[in-house]
Image: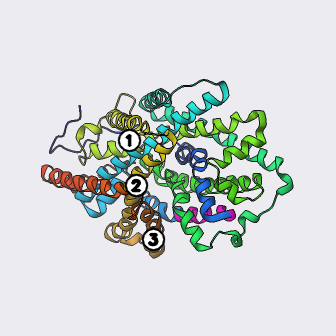
Amino acid sequence: MVVLGTERPVSSTNRLTRNSLSTGDILGVSLANTAPAMSFFFSFAVIAAAAGLASPLAIVVAAIAVLLKINSLVEFTRVTPSTGSYISYIGKTFGAVPGVMTAWALGFGYIVAVGYVMTVMGAWSSLMLAKFIHLQVPWQPITVLFVLFVTYLVYRGVRISTKWAVITFGFELLLILVSMIAMIVTSRAHLNLASLNPHNIKHGLQGIGLAFPLALFMFIGVGNPGAMVEETRNARQAVPIAIYAATIFVSILYVMMAWSTSIAFHDHAGVIAGLAVPFVTGASKSLGPLTILVYLAGLTSTFASLIGATNAQIRMIFSAGREGLLPYGLGKVSRYGTPWVALLLYSGLALMITLIWGSQGSALTEAGVIGTLGTIPIALVYLVLNLALPVYYLTHHRDLFSWWKHLVVPVLGTLALLLPLWGLIQPGQPAPFNLFPGIVLAVLVVGAIYAVIRQRQIPDLSKRVGSIIADE
């Protein structure tokens, strides 16, 4: 049972397992969080429809924007690494009420957004069973089994679950590479660099602008391991290195996937845009009897992503509970050093939302709808973190303040986020997307009310936010 609790000293005993992860482990988790197969499979057709043949360049632009965005996370991690990540950094900058609101909004966003992964995992598995062994199995029980297994792995410890995520991602990467090579070899007569030529961008900057939001969201999980600093050796260096390296690596991988898909379809952007999953279609033609490999890439992608997302996101919720921003019960750890209450809340609520919402129509279609709602509060938090960075450094680390890293880059990162965020909340969207801004606003209002109540219950709450430094 989660206890609401009022004043209580910040517990330094509910610590996660120290020095369990290396830089390589965090790099693997960061890569697994991006889920390159899953992200690219269901995004590229829309990106190609917007940007045309030169859609890989839209991915390059998005990658630059992501590097600007993660700068704020990295710079906070260097001076005050906290398991609370975004929650702690915003709270330490702007105070307890914004910190609690961030915890509330991020918890809502993560729990809803991970429903996208859960739904796709079950639906993709069901599709594979029907296609390759002609067995009709509803996606819902498959999703339940996968979620239970992932929850068990995460409960058993960060080293075990991370190892599963990294190994599964390695298998995913191998299958992606095999699929790309197959497409390139079978279409070698059409090899060219036309898709990397800026002159082939559909409608110029307008095309890039239309493709940019979806291209940006392919990177959305890359910063999640910032919450695993408490369990990482030399976290102040290891986590920034891993996040930057993962972003650069997956950017190159996405561009290569886009280029090889264009080659497979002989640079016919219109054909690519008209397909549901063009990479899978192109790879299937090239792989022939080995088509199952590209489908397995999608399955392993969702599995690794769910482990990575669960591991990182429950730690932020746990940290908020441990420091009193959310109910104290969420700050409990198991005998394996894992945040078990936060884990049960996260997995249980996300699974319930997934099963109810995903069953309202086509699972893969509903997955996109679920993910869209969850992404809005997450994007808002990213934006606020950029605003927090210069304020925090000028207030607490003026001697380390850099005009470039701590002001110019965060401003550019904020501007880069405005376009995709506007695309999510702009008026005139079809149902149910037109309801989402109101839902998020309601969540924020409830969060603000809860934050005021929480601050009255715990007068020194502002001092507790981010008070447990990961490596101290």
Task: Please report the residue visible at 78 percent of the width from the left and 37 percent of the height from the top.
Answer: 288
Assess whether residue 60 is covered by the magenta stretch. yes
Q: Which residue type carries mark 3?
A: Leu
Closer to viewer: mark 3 or mark 1: 3
Q: Which residue lies under the disc numbered 1?
A: 314
Task: State the residue lying farthest toward the right.
Answer: 189
Residue 449 image-quadrant placement: bottom left
Closer to viewer: mark 2 or mark 3: 2
Q: Residues within 10 Å of mark 2 (few under 14, many from 20)?
A: some
Q: Position of residue 419 (x, y in %)?
A: 46, 67
Figure check: 471 above or below 251: above
245 or 184: nearer the viewer: 184
Assess whether residue 212 is covered by the magenta stretch. no
Q: Is residue 56 visible?
A: yes
Q: Which residue lies under the disc numbered 3?
A: 415
Residue 263 image-quadrant placement: bottom right
| Local secondary structure at mark 2 | helix
Q: Is residue 232 visible?
A: no
Using residue 398 as the reference point, say whether residue 44 is left or right of it.
Answer: right
* N-term-proximal mark, 2 vs 3: 3
Q: Residues within 10 Å of mark 3 (few under 14, many from 20)?
A: some
309 or 429: nearer the viewer: 429
Q: Which residue lies under the disc numbered 2?
A: 433
Q: Main secondary structure of the magenta part?
A: helix
Quadrant the N terminus occupies: top left
Task: Please report the residue visible at 73 percent of the width from the left and 59 percent of the height from the top.
Answer: 268
| Local secondary structure at mark 3 | helix
Q: Which residue type carries mark 2?
A: Phe
